[in-house]
């Protein structure tokens, strides 16, 4: 695998206007890697993710992108973030990711519609295209949101706890599917998760946030029983 | 049938009122869809009331600024339009700004804005019985004396609003449904939210001036709320909201003409009835009762 970086943070502080959550942070997302971002609730994972996505401005320093000045990021939020009040079909939700490529006011081109369907099929929910998004199960919603991220034709896929609120069997299937997507499409993936199993099976890099410090490394090192016990303060 | 033919005749005396009702019945639900989806229904109640305070201020200007007030209907109408439009825009910008800052409770802000706007309107008109009568007529939704000029002004402004809303429908939906995705896709969310709120403000300003706050908020909220009970997608929600709005406007006008009732309350009353029927028909226990067992 190439060791080129695709996103880099050096001495960055992240947080909100009134409160710095993490400071003097160094982080590198390697191109083509499947990086798992771990950390306890409240450790600053979501704030870091929002800063990388451009949803929050860095309080100090900047998020650097290599090769592409402004890469296309496919983002998979937690499904509870989306309001069930909107009568949108699964296909409507996926088509939102193509917004930047659509002409204002005109109908969605057949090619974009076909791409959206292809992405839904790739995530195993093609037959649910016309079903109302809000009425799908948690696992089905996450698959639709992953399809949406893929429909953006992303350079980087960023997933914020994609199995939150999803039952155990669907969780396994979704994480296996992500592993397949990484292998087949050679996408750079940044995944926020609590699932150590998927990290051990699929991640090629691990970034672990604890007490405001970010530790980066390979799973063999950071997911060893001794290191995990130390990070979880079991020893 | 004879009455229907009379109403639809091109030389019908109250045709301007009918056409105005139909225009408002078409346009208000289409912007109201976004208020309902964004759970800002109460904004649809407060905004027309604030806008009518602008009308009250315009109508009472001569009391506060001396006898320079014009008695010409056209001039008064223009001043009232400026009052309604300015108050709508200022209110919608202020409320959108506070929403963005997440300062305080939205429902509390809108509730306070509604009662304060009503109180200020009454105070402004307290020393001016003639203007108070005009405002109360507007408040009650008596759409009778709509001039051809007012009809054209309403048509042009609402057509402009609907064109912008339709042309950018996908962007408005994206920034409303998933502002995070919109930001990642480099869509300027705050700018588009402001444009959407300005369109809502424009619609409210124009509608309040010709049909009053009661019909404006009735048509902004109730048709989308009815359509939302059964629509499976955005297209159905939008089209059915507009159809329900136009049908209620026509039926309300017809009922008011036949039984000599005020047009606004008749239309909104019909909408209320339709909402009740839609609510019962789509309520879960009723649906279970009519769904055959497998």
Image (cartoon, rainbow, N blue to C red):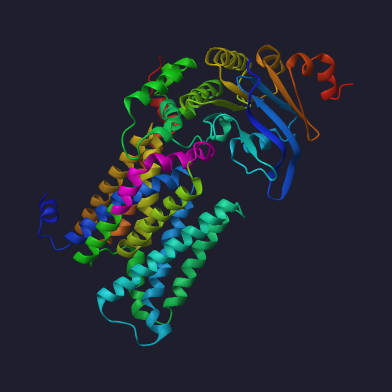
First to last magenta residue range: B160-186
Q: Can residue B270 be seen?
A: no
Query: Which quadrant would residue B44 be assigned to in this image?
Result: bottom left
Which secondary structure is most common in the magenta stretch?
A: helix
The residue lying at 38 percent from left, 53 percent from top is B199
Q: Can residue B30 be seen?
A: yes
Q: Nearer the viewer, residue A54 or B219?
A: A54
Q: Nearer the viewer, residue B196 or B262?
A: B196
Q: Nearer the viewer, residue A89 or A181?
A: A181
Residue B163 counted in the magenta span: yes
Q: Is residue B171 above or below residue A129?
A: below
* Side (left or right) of B140 relative to B37: left
- Residue B54, percent from left and from top: 41, 69
Query: Which quadrant would residue B265 be assigned to in this image?
Result: bottom left
Quadrant showing the C terminus of chain B: top left
* Side (left or right) of A173 relative to B230: right
């Amino acid at each position: 695998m190439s060791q080129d970086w695709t996103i880099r943070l050096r001495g960055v502080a992240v947080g909100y206007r009134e409160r710095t959550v993490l400071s003097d942070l160094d982080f590198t997302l390697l191109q083509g890697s499947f990086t798992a971002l771990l950390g306890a609730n409240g450790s600053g994972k979501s704030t870091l993710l929002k800063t990388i996505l451009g949803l929050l401005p860095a309080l100090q320093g900047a998020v650097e992108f290599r090769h592409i000045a402004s890469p296309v990021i496919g983002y998979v939020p937690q499904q509870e973030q989306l309001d069930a009040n909107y009568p949108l079909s699964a296909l409507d939700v996926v088509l939102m990711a193509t917004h930047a490529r659509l002409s204002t006011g005109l109908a969605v081109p057949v090619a974009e519609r076909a791409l959206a369907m292809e992405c839904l099929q790739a995530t195993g929910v093609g037959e649910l295209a016309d079903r109302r998004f809000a009425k799908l199960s948690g696992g089905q919603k996450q698959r639709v949101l992953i399809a949406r991220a893929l429909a953006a034709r992303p350079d980087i896929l960023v997933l914020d706890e994609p199995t939150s609120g999803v039952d155990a069997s669907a969780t396994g299937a979704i994480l296996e599917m992500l592993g397949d997507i990484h292998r087949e499409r050679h996408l750079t993936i940044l995944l926020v998760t609590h699932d150590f199993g998927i990290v051990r099976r699929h991640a090629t890099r691990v970034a672990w946030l604890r007490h405001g410090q970010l530790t980066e490394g390979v799973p063999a090192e950071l997911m060893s029983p001794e290191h995990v016990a130390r990070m979880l303060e079991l020893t | 049938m004879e009455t229907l033919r009379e109403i639809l005749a091109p030389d019908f005396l109250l045709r301007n009122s009918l056409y105005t009702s139909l225009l408002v019945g078409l346009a208000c639900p289409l912007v109201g869809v976004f208020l309902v989806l964004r759970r800002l229904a109460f904004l649809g109640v407060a905004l027309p009331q604030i806008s009518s305070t602008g009308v009250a201020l315009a109508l009472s200007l001569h009391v506060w600024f001396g006898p320079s007030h014009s008695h010409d209907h056209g001039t008064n109408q223009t001043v009232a339009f400026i009052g309604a439009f300015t108050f709508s825009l200022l209110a919608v910008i202020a409320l959108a700004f506070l929403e963005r800052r997440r300062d305080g409770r939205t429902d509390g802000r809108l509730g306070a804005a509604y009662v304060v706007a009503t109180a200020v309107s009454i105070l402004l008109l307290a020393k001016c019985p003639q203007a108070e009568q005009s405002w109360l007529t507007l408040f009650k939704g008596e759409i009778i004396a709509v001039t051809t000029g007012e009809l054209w002004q309403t048509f042009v402004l609402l057509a402009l609003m609907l064109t912008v809303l339709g042309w950018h429908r996908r962007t408005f939906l994206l920034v409303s449904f998933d502002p995070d995705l919109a930001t990642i896709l480099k869509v300027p969310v705050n700018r588009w939210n402001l444009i959407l709120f300005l369109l809502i403000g424009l619609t409210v300003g124009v509608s309040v001036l010709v049909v009053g706050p009661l019909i404006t908020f009735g048509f902004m909220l109730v048709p989308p709320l009815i359509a939302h009970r059964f629509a499976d997608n955005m297209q159905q929600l939008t089209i059915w909201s507009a159809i329900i709005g136009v049908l209620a406007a026509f039926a309300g006008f017809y009922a008011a003409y036949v039984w000599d009732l005020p047009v606004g309350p008749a239309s909104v009353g019909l909408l209320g009835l339709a909402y009740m029927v839609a609510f019962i028909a789509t309520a879960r226990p009723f649906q279970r009762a009519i769904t055959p067992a497998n």
